[in-house]
Image: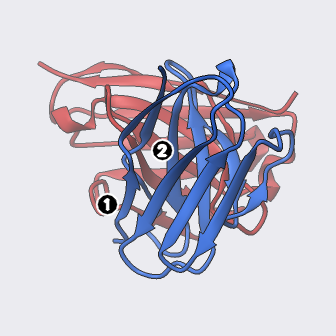
Chain colours: A red, B blue
Amino acid sequence: EVQLVESGGGLVQPGGSLRLSCAASGFTFSSSWMSWVRQAPGKGLEWLANIKLDGSEKYYVDSVKGRFTISRDNAKNSLYLQMNSLRAEDTAVYYCARSLPGKNVFDIWGQGTMVTVSS
Amino acid sequence: AIRMTQSPSSLSASTGDRVTITCRASQGINSYLAWYQQKPGKAPKLLIYAASTLHSGVPSRFSGSGSGTDFTLTISCLQSEDFATYYCQQYYSYPITYGQGTRLEIK
């Protein structure tokens, strides 16, 4: 079964850090661009970042540039999001997602992991 | 960043109805437009990409059209499982951006 499973969410204080993980299975992870997308409570979707097959290219939305870092370990079939300098407005469900070949369109999503930034 | 605007923001309809949701881009995006369906507490599901290409396994009652700046998602005969929130997404340029969503509710 093709699957993505996120982990690492939780409660963190403003200014703190958190590292999210996404474990992939059922497909050739190293052949897929991967993204992180978040959704604040009751709000819409926000794409955050993506990473090329070999990790050589990364793109970010301005709101997280310089604070968040996307990375991957193809040997472990895993995607990561290192989040630093967290703010209250980063509170959201964080999804990892797989891109269709050659397109920034997401056909496989994880179940999401909740991140709450609060004192 | 390209701004995506959906209309309406919410819509009430009945099973069997035909509904259309519109998505407008702040600049031309050719056909680099996708549609997703999301149900409460669940991850989004891909319905359509390249403005009109139905993703594998998606029922044929869903269809998409448009190019440039104006796009539509049509559901030809609403089923109970179609009541959800729908999002458009442009992937013409970074950052990838979404519309604000259209909530489709049962009348």
Q: Position of residue B39 (x, y in %)?
A: 55, 24
Observer-side mark, 2 or 1, equals: 2
Give the structural element (helix, strand or loop) at label 2. Answer: strand
In the depicted structure, whether residue A56 falls above or below residue B34: below
Q: Describe residue A48's horizontal placement relative to residue A34 as left or right.
A: left
Q: Which residue is mark 2?
A: A37
Q: Nearer the viewer, residue B69 or B77?
A: B77
Q: Describe residue A61's horizontal placement relative to residue B87 as left or right.
A: left
Q: Write the residue at 63% across / 31% down.
A: A110
Q: Describe residue B12's horizontal placement relative to residue B91 as left or right.
A: left
Q: Nearer the viewer, residue B96 or B40?
A: B40
For badge 2, the amino acid type reads Val
Chain of the residue that carries numbered disc 1 in the rendered image = A
Chain of the residue that carries numbered disc 2 in the rendered image = A
Q: Which residue is mark 1?
A: A65
One can see residue B81 in this view = yes
